[in-house]
Image: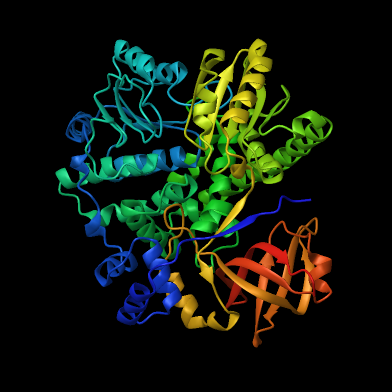
């Protein structure tokens, strides 16, 4: 049985303030309440929120070391020096590499290559193998994206070999900053850049924006790169506020109207070419396909290329020929199908292991280890296990003689501190409050498991082990008109910091059809009607929620919380409710 969720209604805006804002903007009070919940309490702020402008972007030269970075790139371009664009193997890293590579190619620099490290043989971040590869190719400058902020020794090694580094990262720095030509990271304590929640690709974009400003290149020439940027912003789950909101807004326009050939091939594979692509489409359809390449091994590769599936993803993203891009897209999609098959299998194995060990089910955390599992999918499996058991989770496997793994958390619990408490047992680790990666020697697995579990037991608030749904407000179905939906669409793009609103409607019943859909009948599709206002029936879908099917089909009442989405079918747009949770109304 799934864990029962708590519904927590967010604090509501002052009724007088809500009424005044609703009247001034000519919008329903519920939507004015949403604005005030987001700290938008005036017409001026609302207009700025609803109409993001590129002029609101911050000056890239406010970022520490930007002058030095631009000067070094200018020298490399002027002298025809070989530049290697180096990035992490996830979506953020691959889009960042593609963005900077495409910009340098656009301005006419041809002595250029890119490198994505192999997850299996090199691991995350800057590698000695990658630096040696750069040296063999006569590279003078490496631009590292979405990694490098802690690569003190690797940057020093490169310097000995005559290779300069520019680092563009967005992860938290350690006490020591690498001795690179320039280190661009808005999270540096000595950096006064006004927004520190850029994606790795976002930091790379600020570099090319600064170069363009300094060299008289109009911003319009950067706009073809914004589709890559919104894919990174959505996939890396960075807050969709401030500069990210502006960049995502214009990135979505580009992605929908004129995507690059590589992203167009993925859009077509996903069946989204006639759809208004949203952040959700990126998170659940486009991003996972790019990510899948970096998770899988490549059996064969060009000897001049980095030996990684991530390399194939970047090839797709920089490809300018539509036919070739379609072929790359098919390769990427095949990686994704393989990835889904493997992560489904490993998740089932992990579930079976937990269910066969009753003692584990009584703990407040989960640590599972199997040396045969694929390294590239353990993070996905950790997230899947949280869906079932809802507690901090670590999934470990073996790679290159070391035990390596990924950890995921539940809202409110600082996973990074839990991992850090075991630092003496670890070879290395990194991450943030809700996700982390770690490596240790095999002989330390048992002690790590004991200490991690003990730390969680001592520090987690029991309320964090109960999933909750944050509800913005209560609606009648009759209030969900096409006009209401159109106004709600202006709140997009949704994401962290600007979540898709969740509403509650009470005392609804099935009116028409209720059926289980999906390959394993895991989703519940229903036509629902509110008994209080029986003139409105709305189509709904409850993903991964088959539990209440018989109750609903019998016509018994339920309360639902949901998000309002658009459903496009055969060219017709209708309103659909994406059900977050269902509570049967008892006693009827």
Residue 484 visible in the picture: yes
Front position in the image: 489 or 268: 489
Front position in the image: 25 or 99: 25
Residue 390, image quadrant: top right
8 with respect to 131 (left or right): right
Q: Quadrant of the C terminus?
A: bottom right
Q: Residue at x 44, y 16 (%)?
A: 128
328 with respect to 223 (left or right): right
Front position in the image: 72 or 138: 72
Relative to 579, say whether 261 is above or below: above
Q: Residue at x 49, y 28 (%)?
A: 417
Residue 182, x across and y down, in percent: 25, 27
Residue 241, image quadrant: bottom left
Residue 570, x across and y down, in percent: 62, 76
Residue 62, x across and y down, in percent: 19, 41
Residue 302 visible in the picture: no
Relative to 253, say whether 174 is above or below: above
Q: Residue at x 70, y 39 (%)?
A: 343
């Amino acid at each position: 049985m799934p864990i029962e969720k708590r519904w927590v209604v967010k604090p509501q805006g002052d009724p007088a303030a809500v009424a005044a804002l609703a009247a001034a903007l000519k919008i329903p009070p519920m939507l004015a309440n949403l604005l005030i919940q987001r700290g938008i309490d005036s017409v001026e702020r609302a207009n700025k929120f609803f109409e993001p402008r590129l002029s609101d972007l911050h000056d890239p030269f406010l970022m520490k070391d930007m002058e030095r970075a631009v000067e070094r790139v200018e020298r490399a371009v002027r002298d025809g020096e070989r530049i290697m664009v180096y990035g992490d193997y996830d979506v953020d890293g691959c889009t960042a590499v593609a963005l900077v590579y495409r910009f340098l190619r656009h301005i006419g620099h041809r002595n250029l290559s890119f490198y994505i490290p192999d997850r299996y043989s090199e691991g995350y971040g800057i590698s000695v193998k990658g630096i040696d590869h750069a040296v063999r190719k006569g590279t003078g400058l490496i631009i590292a994206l979405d990694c490098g902020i802690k690569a003190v020794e690797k940057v020093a090694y490169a310097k000995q070999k005559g290779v300069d580094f520019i680092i563009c990262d967005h992860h938290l720095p350690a006490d020591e900053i690498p001795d690179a030509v320039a280190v661009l990271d808005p999270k540096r304590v000595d950096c006064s850049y006004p927004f520190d929640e850029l994606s790795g690709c976002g930091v790379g974009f600020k570099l090319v924006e600064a170069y363009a400003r300094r060299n008289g290149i109009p911003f319009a020439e950067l706009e073809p790169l914004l589709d890559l940027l919104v894919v990174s912003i959505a996939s890396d789950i960075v807050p969709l506020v401030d500069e990210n909101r502006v960049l995502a807004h214009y990135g979505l326009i580009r992605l929908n109207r004129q995507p690059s050939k590589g992203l167009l091939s993925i859009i077509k594979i996903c069946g989204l070419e006639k759809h208004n692509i949203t952040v959700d489409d990126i998170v659940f359809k486009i991003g996972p396909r790019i990510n899948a390449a970096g998770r899988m091994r490549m059996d064969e590769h060009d000897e001049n290329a980095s030996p990684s599936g991530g390399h194939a993803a970047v090839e797709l993203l920089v490809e300018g020929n539509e036919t070739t891009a379609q072929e790359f897209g098919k390769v990427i999609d095949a990686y994704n199908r393989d990835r889904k098959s493997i992560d489904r299998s490993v998740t089932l194995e992990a579930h079976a292991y937990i269910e066969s060990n009753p003692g584990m089910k009584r703990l407040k955390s989960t640590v599972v280890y199997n040396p045969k599992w694929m390294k590239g999918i353990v993070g996905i499996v950790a997230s899947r296990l949280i869906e079932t058991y809802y507690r901090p989770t670590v999934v470990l496997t073996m790679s290159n003689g070391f035990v390596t793994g990924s950890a995921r958390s539940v809202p409110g619990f600082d996973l990074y501190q839990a991992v850090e408490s075991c630092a003496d047992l670890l070879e290395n680790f990194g991450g943030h409050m809700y996700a982390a990666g770690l490596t240790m020697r095999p002989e330390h697995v048992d002690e790590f498991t004991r200490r991690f579990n003990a730390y969680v037991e001592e520090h987690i608030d029991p309320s964090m082990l109960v999933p909750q749904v944050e509800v913005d407000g209560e609606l009648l179905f009759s209030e969900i008109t096409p006009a209401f939906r159109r106004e709600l669409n202006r709140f997009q793009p949704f994401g962290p910091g600007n979540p898709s609103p969740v509403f509650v409607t009470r005392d609804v019943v099935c009116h028409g059809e209720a059926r289980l859909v999906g390959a394993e009948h895991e989703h519940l599709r229903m036509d629902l009607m509110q008994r209080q206002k029986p003139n409105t029936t709305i189509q709904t879908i409850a993903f991964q929620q088959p539990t209440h099917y018989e109750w609903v089909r019998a016509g018994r009442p339920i309360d639902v919380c949901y998000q309002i989405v658009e459903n496009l079918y055969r060219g017709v747009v209708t309103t659909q409710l994406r059900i977050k949770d269902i509570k049967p109304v008892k006693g009827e």
